[in-house]
Image (tube, rainbow, N blue to C red):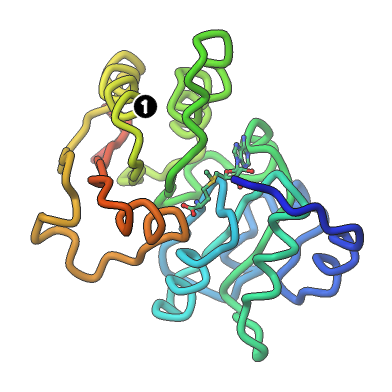
Amino acid sequence: MRMRSIPDAADRIARSACHVANPTAMKGKWREHLHVSGPLHVEIGSGRGRFIITMASRHPEAGFVAIERFASVLAQMVGHIPEQSLTNLAVICMDAQILGECFAPGEIDLIHLNFSDPWSKVRYEKRRLTSRSFLDLYRMVLSEKGELHFKTDNADFFEYSLESFPQAGWKMDNITRDFHAEPLSEGNIMTEYEVKFSGLGHPIHRLTARPDGKET
Ligand SMILES: C[S@@+](CC[C@H](N)C(=O)[O-])C[C@H]1O[C@@H](n2cnc3c(N)ncnc32)[C@H](O)[C@@H]1O
C-alpha cells in the first residue's frame, strides 16, 4: 500500500472510540468488549478499512476486529468510521505475528485476508500472510467451525497459497480465479484494492479454507 506519512497518526487513532490500545488485555473477551453474541470476524491488513467498516455496519449482530500494522494507514481508516461510531468494530495497530497473544484459542470465527502484500521475493516468504507460520497461528485462534476467506489479484501469490494451505493441513473450498464472474460474489464487499484492480480489469482470485480436523 502506498503510504502517506501522517505525523499525528497516533493521536488520530487514539481519539477513535473503536481503538483498542492494549489488545492483549482483550484476549478471550472480544465479544464482551464489542457487546455481541454473534460471530467474531478479524481482518488482517485492513488498509483504509472499506471492507470491515461496511461489514460492521451491515452486521450489527457480529463483532469485527481490524488489524493493521501501520499507524499512518490505520489513521486514515479511523477517519472513515461513521460519526456515530460502530460499537461492534475494534481497530488495533499491531503486526499479526502476535495474534496468539491477543485472541484466545478458538475465539475467532472468520479471518479475512484481503489483497495481502504478496512479498514476491522468496527471501520474504515468511512475511506472506498465507505462509506456514501464519497458518499455524490462525489454526490456534479459529473456532471449531472457523474459516478463512482470502482474496487477491496476484496470480502468483494465489498459486503459492493453493500449495501452502494443504501443506499446513487446511482444506480449501470455493476456489476461483475470477471471483466477480461467480454467483458466489453476490453481496461481495469490495476492498479499496479490489475496487482499484478490478477497475483495471484484473481478475480477482479467491478461496475459502479451514484447518482440517477442527470442524465437528
Ligand atoms: C496491500 S494492502 C491491502 C489493504 C486492504 N485489505 C485492501 O484490500 O484494500 C495490505 C495491508 O496489509 C497490512 N499488513 C501487511 N502485513 C501485515 C501484518 N503482518 N500485520 C498487520 N497488517 C499487515 C499492510 O500494512 C497494508 O496496509
Give the left or right position of residue 110, taking residue 129 as reference: left
- Seen in the picture, residue 121 relative to 178 is either above or below; the reply is above
The quadrant holding residue 123 is: top right
- Seen in the picture, residue 182 relative to 186 is either above or below; the reply is above
Front one among 199 and 60 = 199
The residue drawn where x is 41% and y is 63% is 39
Residue to which mark 1 is pinned: 157
- Circle 1 packing at 10 Å, graded few (<14), some (14-19), many (20+), is some
Give the left or right position of residue 153, taking residue 42 as reference: left
Report the residue that reaches farthest toward the bottom: 84
In which quadrant will I find the C terminus?
top left
Q: Amino acid at mark 1?
A: Phe
Label 1: state its secondary structure: helix
The residue drawn where x is 43% and y is 60% is 191
Give the left or right position of residue 78, taking residue 128 as reference: right
The image quadrant where one finds ligand 1 is top right
- Seen in the picture, residue 183 relative to 100 is either above or below; the reply is below
The residue drawn where x is 45% and y is 27% is 135
Report the residue that reaches farthest toward the top: 123
- Residue 83 x, y percent position in the rendering: 67, 89
- Seen in the picture, residue 167 relative to 138 is either above or below; the reply is above
- Residue 2 x, y percent position in the rendering: 63, 47
The quadrant holding residue 4 is: bottom right
In which quadrant will I find the N terminus?
top right
The residue drawn where x is 48% and y is 50% is 108
Front one among 47 and 40 = 47
The quadrant holding residue 180 is: bottom left
Front one among 138 and 180 = 180
